Amino acid sequence: MVDAVPLAGMREFAAPPWTNESEQWQALDERLPADHLARRLNRAVDMLDLNALLESYLGVGRKALRPDLLLKAVLYEMQNKRPSPAQWAKDVRESEPVRWLLFGMEPSRARLYDFRDRLRPFLEEWNAQVLQLAMELDLTSASRVALDSSSVAAHASRRQFLNEERLQKRRQLIDERLQHLERGEAVPKEPKQPGWLAETESGLRQQKQRYQRAAEVMCERQEANARRGSSKRKPADKVLVSPTDPEAALARDKANVFRPLYTVQLLRDLDSPLILRCHVLTQNNDNGVLEPMIERMVDNVGVKPTEVFVDSGYVSLWHLEFCSQAGITLYGPCQEND
């Protein structure tokens, strides 16, 4: 029953337009197959402890929409490879499974973006709850796992990289423009306005913060470059950073395109469909990844694996030494994935 929420500490949220007695909801329910993904997700979310999410609402002003129902719809959309709140805003009106999950709620695009951002602090704990329940039900022993990674493109231009000199020139130009605006002076006209430069004071302040972070990352990269051996050290002016996503690693993707990247690490259970641990890194290799991934897996499920399967990128002296000390057998090709 939508009216009987089995969650301790449920605050006063806005009631959805329908209950399970509503004709509109019953019509959708009749058309939804018994084994449909929406039904499985509905049952799964009901098993989670969502009290931390509920307590994140202040309980003032206009009543918030039911977060448990929103979560069910968001998970359904993600499972259908629709990760954008802009897509969700369309589906809350047009997708029958989504409307069934939401009991007729039609949150706006802005509300869906806000809800997506609100979820971030709770995802890891919910994943741990699922894994602990799977262990209690003997769905897996978590003894055999596979570790793999995949590069994903950052939301940043692959054509706008700066070296230290160009970065400092841009920071100086931003500061000069802000000083003129703060003194109420007219901004000097230039023959050609830089396309990257914000026009408003608020935009310039945001750029100032972002470029400050880019300068910090540049300093870290210059220091790391200086520590390399002479044969592997780059000229200082060849050390680059992306001003729109400074933390992203700059490397070639699988299509051999040089661009800002993140690396997603996945620790998969080989005896069930479960993901035992995932992590996003700002590096373009698998160095030093195995140990922290195993440690975080232990935090989630309480046990460490006995066998780990990897590709050649993980077969290193560092990883072999860790596995030997932890009593883990590491399987992987040496040097080549042939």
Image: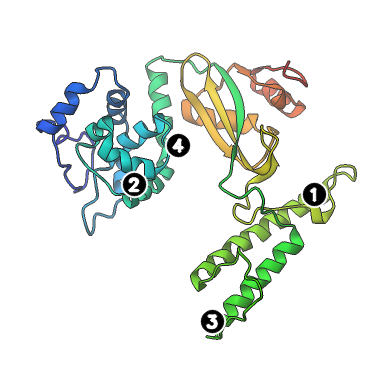
Q: Dividing the picture into quarters, in which one does residue 322 lie?
A: top right
Indicate whether 171 appears above or below 301: below
The residue mark sitting in front, 1 or 3, is 3
Q: Dividing the picture into quarters, in which one does residue 76 lie?
A: top left
- For mark 4, what is the residue? 124
Q: Amino acid at mark 4?
A: Glu
- For mark 2, what is the residue? 112
The residue mark sitting in front, 4 or 3, is 3
Q: Residue 61 at x, y = what percent?
A: 22, 59
Q: Amino acid at mark 3?
A: Glu
Tag 1's secondary structure?
helix
- For mark 3, what is the residue? 182
Q: Residue 133 at x, y = what percent?
A: 38, 23
Q: Residue 179 at x, y = what percent?
A: 59, 80
Q: Earlier in the sequence, mark 3 or mark 2?
A: 2
- For mark 1, what is the residue? 225
The residue mark sitting in front, 2 or 4, is 2
C-alpha span from label 2 to label 4: 20 Å
